[in-house]
Image: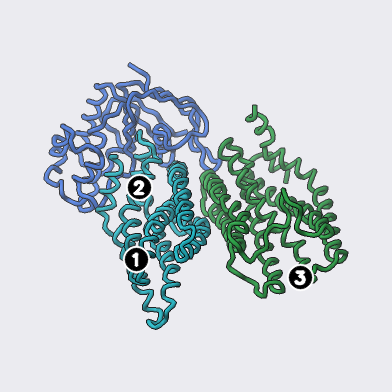
Amino acid sequence: MIKNFIHQFASPKTYIYQVDRLYPYILYISLTIYLISIFWGLFLTPEDFVQGNSYRIIYLHVPASFISQSLFMAMAIASAIYLIWKVKLSVYLVRSIAPIGAVTTFIALISGSIWGIPTWGTWWVWDARIVSTLILFIMYLGLISLHDSFSNHEKADKFLSILALVGSVNIPIIKMSVEWWSTLHQPASITISNKPAIDLVMLYPLFGSMIGFAGIVTCLVILSSKLQILKRERNKSWVKNYA
Amino acid sequence: MHLKVKAKNLSYKINEKKLFHDISFELFSGKAIHVQGDNGSGKTTLLKIICGLTNQVKGDLELKLDKKICFLGHKNALKQYLTVEQNLSLLGVSDHQDLNKHLIEFALNKSLDVTLSNLSFGQQKKIALLRVFLNDSDLLVLDEPCVGLDQQSQKYLCSFINNELTLGKSILFSSHISLDITSEVLNLNK
Amino acid sequence: MNIIKYELLKLRSKSRGWLGPILVFILIMVAFPLTIEISNNDLGQSFFSVLWIAMLLVMMLATEDIFLEDYNDGSLDQFAISNINLSYVVAAKIFIYWLLIGLPISLLGSLFCLGMTNSIYLASHILPILLVTSYIFINVFSFGNALSLTKGSVLGTLVTLPLLLPLLIVLGKVVISINLNLNYLGFVGLLLGVLSIIIFLIPLIISYIIRAHLE
């Protein structure tokens, strides 16, 4: 029964048509949310007691790093779906998320470096969380290069999904790295169990910017996945009608 | 006479391009099938599908075997840096009673301590064929077994295979040259 | 059991396969003090970093053709067809590589540690860590090698190297813990735990990858 359910939604053709309908809504709503949050965060919140105004890069850095890790988990789940149920759309998604994830991780690293200059005095330090995020970036690039080096697409898909699954052990390491090793990077301010360590006034734009950024990244993933589907299914008849 | 292999409407694609489609056959014990076709028509791929190395894209394949499959492909699966004797021990045939008989026929019984890389292509092929000669299976899958063999060895191989057929084994082989084996023909050309 | 014997015969006879990496390791460890002034007392501190990196590189070198040779001459096809479980074959191969390359290197590394720091305590405590770490390295690099079996080993190694970097971070902490004598057994337990998971999972994953390559 689950098989039927999945195969119903797994047709790339249905996916593209549905996604085309939703795309403008997602794009405009998330852009609005993100810009409002940024504006709120940049101009309407007070200065931080310790860091002054430089903390404001949190509205770019935190969403970027959170999204980059979530994207990798999404890739791992999609890879598992592909390996178990052989749904081709899943692996198209994995391949299309990879470059977006790489860019998001890059943004997280760069914004983190920029934040480091006023607060820590240095733009790079070899601490566990930063190095693990760098590893995440390299893994994204490795996934892309591994997939593109095989001319036989079925093989390439299998290896991509295996590597994405195996590489997903890095995500818990990133998340726990701040707890396991006492490092320079500050621990998480927002946890499920405790009260947030950050002031509520700054928390709301942070949530807003996370949602907005997530929406923008979703639009990018949609665009990338459309490209992958059209590229891989170009011999099918519905593609000729679509384009 | 038992049914050993039943194939129905097998087809295979590479990167969305069809290689062969709707291939069906039944292989009984004591019978042989000769797979024919032009270069690139998919003979090796079909044999690999029967062995279970590759999966067909469409169609059903049923194998009813009591023992395992003996496969000899284009590659010999021998180690170049080991001697003939060590390679035979890797094959697991060192104590076989018929080993010496076949070695004498192939004129290799004096070469047991020669490193494999010092043998010629045909001689290495003969050592690889020992896997077939001393097999313990009920399905033999041979991909162009006579490549590199001299006339005498080809005749020896064919008579051996005919003998195996009388013992009730099934043989599936591909060859460009016609071999003296009683077999049905399966042609892969469209 | 037979498989292990066969793999042992294969690797033992191919002396460049196991002797080469051991000699490279010795070379690196001998060359290291030459690049630092003799009067420098920091030799002990940077020694361990060189030890881990040397082991990393040598394992990368050693597993470069762990499956390639068998793939090229058709032995992997035969293994895949036979009744033997392919993951058992892979596990046996990795074990033999560890026995003939990882084990000697761990012993040598421990000896070099003795020579460099003159402390039997350090050398004896680093030996189990080296043994377990070399096994983990061989497993992960074999995984990388299997992934890019047909495209040369560099791609696969580069792609799986990031997975080992957290391990290197842990190894750095281990040395500190030995020096300060705190929580050493905890780290050994951690490494053994990681190894026990890897030892079962990696052969299964590699056998799946190899079957995908053979198609």
Front in this rendered view, residue B155 or B5: B5
> Are the residues under badges 2 and 3 in a single subunit?
no
Q: Is residue C129 above or below residue C199?
A: below
Mark 2 is on which residue type? Answer: Lys
Residue type for callout 1: Ile
Left or right placement of residue B173 versus residue C198 in this view: left
Q: Secondary structure at mark 1?
A: helix
Chain A: drawing colour: green
Whole-number angstrom distance, CA of label 1 to CA of label 3: 49 Å
Q: Nearer the viewer, mark 1 or mark 3?
A: 1
Residue C24 sits in quarter: bottom left
- The three-letter code of the residue at mark 3 reads Gln
Give percent across and percent down for residue A98. 63, 53
Q: Is residue B169 above or below residue C159?
A: above
Colour assignment, chain B? blue
In the picture of the structure, the residue carrying the numbered disc 1 is: C120
Q: Which chain is cyan?
A: C
| Chain designation of label 1 | C
- The secondary element bearing badge 2 is classed as helix
Q: Are marks 1 and 3 on the same chain?
A: no
Residue, x 24% and y 22% (percent of image)?
B167
Q: Which residue is mark 2?
A: C93
The chain carrying label 2 is C
What residue appears at the point 78 percent right and 47 percent down from the top-left corner? A23
* Mark toward the viewer: 2 or 3: 3
Q: Nearer the viewer, residue A54 or B132?
A: A54
On screen, residue A137 versus residue C97, left or right, reads right
Label 3 packing within 10 angstroms: few (<14), some (14-19), many (20+): few
